[in-house]
C-alpha cells in the first residue's frame, strides 16, 4: 500500500493532467469553431429583435442625439460612453452562434456596427463632438445595409 504522501502526489498529478487535457480540448474546440464555444457559454437568451430593442436602438438614439444636445457634464458624457460600449458589444453579440445568419452581409454589418460603436467610444473618451457625429454616420450606414437585406417588413 502506498504511503499517504505518495497518494496525495498521485492525486495531484492526475488532477493536473485532467486540467491539461481539458485545456487542450477547449483550445482545439475554440480553433475548430472559430473561437465560438457554445457548449460552455449556452445559447443566446434574447432574440435579435429583443437585442435591437433593448440595446441597439436606445444606444444608437443616445449617439444620434449628441450633435443636437451635446453632453454638458461628466454624467452626460458617461451616458454617451456607455451607449458607445453597448453598440460596440452589440455587434459582437449579433455574430454569436445562434444569432448570426448565414450571410456575409450579416457578418459585415455586425462588424460595422461594432466599429461604429468603437469609434463613438473613442470620441466619447476624447469629448470629441465631431467624432461622435462621424460615428453616428457610420452607424447609420451599417444599419441601413443590414436592414435592407434582413429586416422583415
Image (spheres, rainbow, N blue to C red):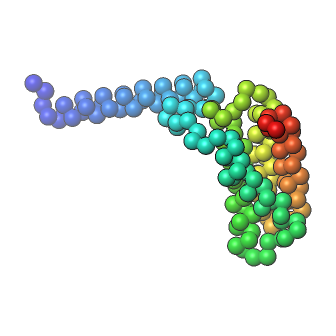
Task: State the image coordinates of residue 103 (x, y, percent, origin top left).
Answer: 77, 27
Furthest toward the bottom, the residue is 73
Front-most of residues 127 and 92 = 92
Q: Which residue is drawn at 58% across and 39% down?
A: 44
Q: Residue at x 61, y 43 (%)?
A: 46
Q: Residue at x 84, y 70 (%)?
A: 69
Residue 78 visible in the picture: yes
- For residue 29, which quarter of the picture? top right
- For residue 48, which quarter of the picture? top right
Task: State the image coordinates of residue 2 (x, y, percent, origin top left).
Answer: 13, 27
Q: Note whether 95 is above or below 67 in the view shown.
A: above
Q: Note whether 153 is above or below 134 in the view shown.
A: above
Q: Note whether 139 is above or below 11 in the view shown.
A: below
For the N terminus, the quadrant is: top left
> How many tags in the picture?
0
Q: Which residue is drawn at 88% across and 68% down?
A: 68
- For residue 64, which quarter of the picture? bottom right
Furthest toward the left, the residue is 1
Task: State the image coordinates of residue 112 (x, y, percent, origin top left).
Answer: 80, 42
Residue 108 visible in the picture: no
Task: State the image coordinates of residue 17 (x, y, percent, origin top left).
Answer: 36, 28
For the C terminus, the quadrant is: top right
Q: Note whether 144 is above or below 36 in the view shown.
A: below
Front-most of residues 120 and 101 = 101
Front-most of residues 139 and 29 = 139
Furthest toward the front, the residue is 153
Residue 107 left/right relative to 135: left
Amino acid at each position: 500500500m502506498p504511503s499517504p504522501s505518495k497518494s496525495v502526489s498521485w492525486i495531484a498529478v492526475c488532477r493536473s493532467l485532467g486540467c491539461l487535457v481539458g485545456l487542450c480540448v477547449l483550445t482545439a474546440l475554440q480553433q475548430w469553431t472559430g473561437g465560438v464555444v457554445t457548449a460552455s457559454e449556452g445559447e443566446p437568451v434574447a432574440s435579435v429583435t429583443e437585442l435591437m430593442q433593448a440595446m441597439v436602438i436606445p444606444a444608437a438614439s443616445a449617439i444620434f442625439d449628441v450633435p443636437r444636445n451635446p453632453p454638458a457634464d461628466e454624467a452626460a458624457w458617461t451616458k454617451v460612453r456607455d451607449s458607445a460600449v453597448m453598440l460596440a458589444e452589440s455587434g459582437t453579440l449579433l455574430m454569436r452562434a445562434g444569432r448570426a445568419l448565414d450571410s456575409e452581409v450579416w457578418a459585415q454589418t455586425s462588424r460595422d456596427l461594432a466599429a461604429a460603436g468603437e469609434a463613438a467610444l473613442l470620441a466619447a473618451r476624447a469629448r470629441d463632438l465631431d467624432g461622435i457625429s462621424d460615428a453616428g454616420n457610420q452607424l447609420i450606414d451599417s444599419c441601413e445595409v443590414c436592414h435592407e437585406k434582413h429586416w422583415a417588413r
